[in-house]
Image (spheres, rainbow, N blue to C red):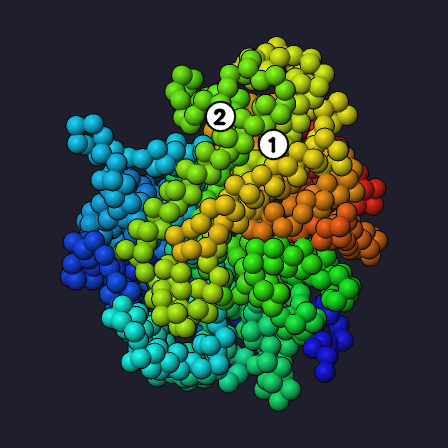
Amino acid sequence: MTKVTLKDLSLREQRLSQRVLELKQAYFRAVPEICCERPVLVTRFARQHGFFDKQRISALEKARQYRHVLEHRRPVVWHDRAVERSMASFAVKDRSLFAGSTTSHFKGVPIFPEFMGLALWPELHNIKTRAANPYFLDDDDARALNEDVFPFWLDHSILEVCRKRLSSQSPAPGGRGRDTIEMNLLEMLVFFLASKANCISHTIPDFTQALRLGLRGIADEARKRGQAARNAEQRDFYAAMVEAMAGIMAYSRNLAAEARRMAAAATDADEKAELLAIAAINERVPELPARSFREGLTTIWICWTAIHLENPDVGLSLGRLDQVLFDLYQKDIASGVLTVEQAIELLACLWLKIGDHVPCVPATGEQLFGGTGSNQAITVGGVDAKGANSVNDLTYVMIRATELMMLRDPNLNARYFSGVNDKAYLRRLCEVNLNTGATPALHNDRAVIAALTAKGETLEQARDYGVIGCVEPGSNGRSYGATASILLNLTSVLELALYNGEHRHTGRGNLISERTGEAASFRSFADFKQAFVRQAAWMVERATALNQALGLTHQDVYPTPILSSLFEGPMDKGKDLIFGGATINSSGASIIGFADVVDSLAAIEQVVFTEKAMGLPDLLAVLDANFAGHEALLARLRNPLRTPKYGNESPVADALALWLATTLDELFGSKQNYRDGRWRVGYWTMTNHAGFGRLSRATPNGRRDGENFTSGITPVSGVTPSLTKALGSVASLPSKVLSNGVAFNIKYTPDHAHLDRMLDNFVASVEGYFDPVRGGAGGMEIQFNVTTHDTFVDAVKNPQNYPELLVRVSGYTAYFKDLNPQMQQEIIERTEYDLGLGRAVEFARNS
């Protein structure tokens, strides 16, 4: 039986309901409001139970804490306009089809004092008025955070606990402790970021058991396993699972009770009926198995709110929902209890619920890395575990809901396997990109599956991958990949190699790493590459060592019983995720500045060692001067006809790109993480390529002080005039060295006057990029901005005219107005291609 029965794959006759239109209007007008409910409840429980005095907190203790929070948090069914300050300026009914929320507000900002929440402490009294992305904060809530929450976490956040432990292990002369070099490197900002100080979330839960068994079934299984446990630690872990499930079930029942209370007071017959329906559903799920599509969505949503109470909202992703929910959808459609129109309304309501919160970003973070959402990815399409076509009717319904909503979150990612999936499916994905300007991202199943199997996953596990956060592939619900564990600034490795272990950001004369040779000492490019590899190895060692220390800290004080209960592996192993309970236990690093380093290496090889046009010390002097007085050299370094550039199918540059990606894969792949898994490397940058670029000095590829680095695995902007060659260079990189995912950003000029012709060219460009070349599997991922240069320029000048302008940054979607000026400029300056001509569009830079 075919899984696709729709006659019109575009579902263009389907429109958003009035309910959804009102909710969407409210969503875009609401100001994010800091929520102090969770931090207050967590802190009070921690104080009452002596958490601040303990060296180790068990999974059972954590589960009791989260059960307490779930049982005592406010059950929000529909947000009351009278108390929602962020929405008080206009009237709209919140009549979502789903009860519950990740915070207590319509659009909230969750605070995790256990992680980086304290970074907001200096801003509590002016965060409402800051220029970039202000948050509303009630005076009473500010007082609660200032007096009742933050003081108790000052020495007990993950970062500070880890710092104290490292300090006690590294006594300085005289007996005083000291911070390790790894912690210092983290705080210098230009070397690497270690996300475990802020989250341990980048992963996909397993919703299948919650849908099939219900949470009561999961708790019953855990209770049975606990009775047969081998030791006290396992018994406590299984008891923690029971506690976690009890907390989530209690929260859903509280929502049901609140819905019944509201129904009793309702005077509108339709509202009363809707509230009673919500009550009946939440009384049943997620405790019991889901029987309908709506019950299935409710189960996932209630579990999702609970997971977000345990883990910060960074990169937690929902996985292959078109596969997980298809049977329920198909059954309801066949029985006539559900129509496509109703399914789209349900999904649209859920999409808004998924985006009901924004990350907590301090002012400094906004200046350097601002504009990101929480990057909650949903994956559709591709093949199933047996390799068969898995595109179904629900796939197209989800695509249509995304097309109509045009939201930042969830971040839709579409899988495509050429020769297995129908080409009409690919054409539909390209059409949606034209209509939204930025979504979905497209992933080549052949390449991704090859990458995952190269790292030891079975073929069945690899075929069942979902996209995490930005673009990171992970086997759905069984791979605890922590895919954003490290964000490494590769340009700093280049800097250390050029300046003999020193870095201009921290000041010349200040040795950072190790001496690998003065610039004048390198007799060949091979000598310089050797120095580069030594510096890269040193940086990888430092970054993974800090991740190890932070991971061990998590094991002692931050178990994850909720997520462990909704994952494949922990039930069978009797072990929490942070101890290696998952079926697959990799860690992920992402590389910032890949193209800038490739082009810089190519410039050094060509200008210094091949042509001998100048010595390396002379080139460094030019960099120190930021090219002032060396405009001719600057023009030469930027010219792809005179200096090899990645993205032009240049043998020199492409060979360096392959060498660099292979080297990094080997360096990281040799490291084992604290959960007995191996490291994987990817190339996606969120907004960090703009933030790191702002802090970094000139580089040999012709980039000036403070200019942006290039996003993801994309070639440097303005140096790749041929679309075909740009696609070919990126596609030539073997996917086995890109196993943590890549973000390849392409900008196309929209041509709505000739839509069919543009769609033909769009589909052809994707097929060409995904096509296996040179014995490889083809390009791994590609994402688009289909908006003109002039539109982006005007959006900077008149942001009020573009409140919903959606853009692809590097792996995720964002609203252009929310990005910092540095990031906006990076998107403006990206190479834009005319698909009909296959050539770059000329426009003035730095406009």
Q: Residue at x 65, y 57 (%)?
A: 450
Q: Position of residue 343 (x, y in %)?
A: 59, 75
Q: Residue at x 46, y 77 (%)?
A: 209
Residue placed most toward the observer, 43 or 200: 200
Label 2, on which residue?
496
Q: Position of residue 337 (x, y in %)?
A: 58, 86
Q: Position of residue 3 (x, y in %)?
A: 69, 77
The mark nearer the N terminus, 1 or 2, is: 2
Quarter-wise, where is residue 429 in the image?
A: bottom right
Three-letter code for the amino acid on which mark 2 is drawn: Leu
Residue placed most toward the observer, 683 or 670: 670
| Left or right of residue 255: residue 520 | right
How far apart are the two marked residues, 1 and 2, measured between alpha carbons? Answer: 15 Å
Q: Where's the C terminus, which quadrant?
A: top right
Three-letter code for the amino acid on which mark 1 is drawn: Asp
Q: Position of residue 4 (x, y in %)?
A: 71, 76
| Left or right of residue 288: residue 73 | left
Neighbor class of circle 1 (other Cα within 10 Å; few <14, some 14-19, many 20+) is many
Image: 109 above or below 727 = below
Label 1, on which residue?
596
Quarter-wise, where is residue 837 in the image?
A: top right
Neighbor class of circle 2 (other Cα within 10 Å; few <14, some 14-19, many 20+) is many
